[in-house]
Image (cartoon, grey):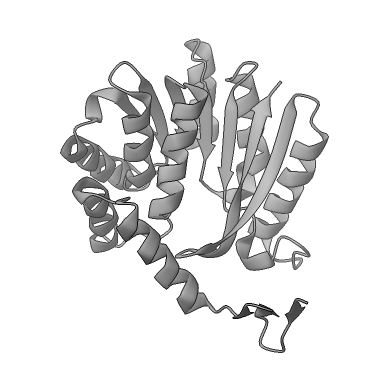
Amino acid sequence: MIARGADGWVRGNVGAVTAPDWVSLDELFDRVLHTEDGPLQAARETGLATGMPAIEVSAQHAKLLSLLVRIAGARSVLEIGTLAGYSTIALARAVGPDGVVVSLECESAHAELARRNLEHAGVNARVEVIVGAALDTLPQLQQRGDLFDLVFIDADKENNIAYVEWAISLGKPGTTIVVDNIARNGRVLDPDPGDQQAQAVHDMLVMMGAHPRLETAAIQTVGAKGWDGFAVSLVK
């Protein structure tokens, strides 16, 4: 039997699970699976030191991204949202020395820090960081004929539908699309009228489910980033 208590936590035969336990378990995963090395830690820490919001993916999500790239055999990856380059490092490592990652970042200061972190990780030669609003720079990629095997979307949620549409346009049959932050602490279930991010994610999921060229699953997660998750699509 599983029930939700007055405090909001889900309880069942395994007892109560609270947010601090999620964080501790993620820390165990990171430690025993040897997930986060020095360059990744530096990317996280330098972002915090310069006042960036701590919204990069968790260590386990970054590792999952790298595994998805390798499972898909992706050699060309598009990332929408660079921040300090944490997930970019994971993606660049996964594409290998002959692969390429194009990462779009709207803030020039973030992009510059990301480039330094990529250099520290030894993968800067595989990554092109493009500065500007993604909806302005995505058409440039189309104009130069770029096509991608995998697209990772982790930027302003209000534009998620447009980003997914661009991912399809810049993809091909078999391209994988990964969208981060699809639960928003459960707010996506019934967004408040003023919660534009949750509403945008909700609308994006509806769009992905109805799109004739997408096959999609949405996965809820708990951990260091709280209650959230990601969507994974295959372009048909």
Q: Position of residue 62 (x, y in %)?
A: 41, 46
From the viewer's perspective, is 135 left or right of 54?
right
Q: Position of residue 87 (x, y in %)?
A: 38, 43
User: Farthest front residue?
Assistant: 13
Q: Is residue 220 above or below residue 91?
A: below
- What residue appears at the point 59 percent right and 54 percent down from the top-left corner? 229
Q: Is residue 193 above or below residue 121?
A: below
Instruction: Please say whether residue 78 is visible from this viewpoint.
Output: no
Quarter of the image with the N terminus is bottom right
From the viewer's perspective, is 33 left or right of 223?
left
- What residue appears at the point 62 percent right and 39 percent down from the top-left corner? 232
User: Farthest bottom residue?
Assistant: 6
User: Which of the two residues, 231 or 135, is positioned nearer the viewer here?
Assistant: 231
The answer to which image quadrant residue 169 occupies is top right
Number of marks: 0
- What residue appears at the point 57 percent right and 38 percent down from the top-left corner? 178
Q: Position of residue 111 (x, y in %)?
A: 31, 41
Quarter of the image with the C terminus is top right
The answer to which image quadrant residue 93 occupies is top left
Instruction: Please say whether residue 24 is visible from this viewpoint.
Output: yes
Q: Position of residue 207 (x, y in %)?
A: 77, 39
The answer to which image quadrant residue 107 occupies is top left
From the viewer's perspective, is 149 left or right of 118?
right
User: Which of the two residues, 73 or 188, is positioned nearer the viewer here?
Assistant: 73
User: Which of the two residues, 128 or 22, is positioned nearer the viewer here?
Assistant: 22
